[in-house]
Image (cartoon, rainbow, N blue to C red):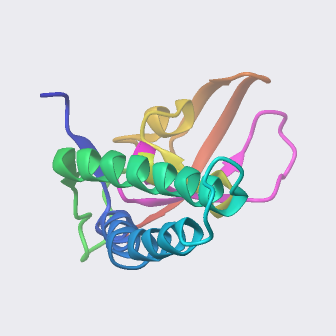
């Protein structure tokens, strides 16, 4: 079997809820759509039928994918108490870009698994260059990160678990 996939408890719940919605709401709904389209007659030129079948294929594929991933998930619960010693999976990290010596705005990220990474929501993957450089580092440490745009240096301003 393949490797386990690290995930936060919140990410696990989101996947579980999506799977539940697909199985209990989306799947029965598309089956009903197919039955109604079939009742319209000639299936060869029935756009509603073909659309519903395509939707069903997508739903079944997504269910299969999520079932497979759920079997491999490793829920990692970050520490909840105390002052964080170092950056770990599930940590929230506030960084300051110190590359050019100018005072740039602080950036705040949460380190999560690949399945729940979402840069728009400041959740970065454990396998990303930034996260890899931060793991096991402490407040005050400066880390160098090689990014597609070039090398950057960040100072760790704060770590929390929330």
Q: Residue at x 83, y 39 (%)?
A: 101
Q: Image check: 145 left or right of 64?
A: right
Is residue 88 visible from the viewing direction of this image? no
Counting the numbered discs, the total is: 0
- Can residue 43 be seen? yes
Q: Is residue 8 above or below residue 136?
A: below
Q: Is residue 39 above or below residue 120?
A: below
Residue 15 spot, x, y in % from top left: 36, 63
Residues drawn in magenta: 88-114
Residue placed at 54% from the left, 48% from the top?
124
The quarter of the image holding the N terminus is top left
Q: In the figure, residue 85 lies in which quadrant?
A: bottom left
Rendered position, 72 above or below 30: above
- Compare residues 6 and 86 and report the one nearer the observer: 6
Judging depth in this view, the residue of 8 and 111 nearest the camera is 8
Left or right: 1 in relation to 129:
left
Q: Is residue 45 left or right of residue 4?
A: right
């Amino acid at each position: 079997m393949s490797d386990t996939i690290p995930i936060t408890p919140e990410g696990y719940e989101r996947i579980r809820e999506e799977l539940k919605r697909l199985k209990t709401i989306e799947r029965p709904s598309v089956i009903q759509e197919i039955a109604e389209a079939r009742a319209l007659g000639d299936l060869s030129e029935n756009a509603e039928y073909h659309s519903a079948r395509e939707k069903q294929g997508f739903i079944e594929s997504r269910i299969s994918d999520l079932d497979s991933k759920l079997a491999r998930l490793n829920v990692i619960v970050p520490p909840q108490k105390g002052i964080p010693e170092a950056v770990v999976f599930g940590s929230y990290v506030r960084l300051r870009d110190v590359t050019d010596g100018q005072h740039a705005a602080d950036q705040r990220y949460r380190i999560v698994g690949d399945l729940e990474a979402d840069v728009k929501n400041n959740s970065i993957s454990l396998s990303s260059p930034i996260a890899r450089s931060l793991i096991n580092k402490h407040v005050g440490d400066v880390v160098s990160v090689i990014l597609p745009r070039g090398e950057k240096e960040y100072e760790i301003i704060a770590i929390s678990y929330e």
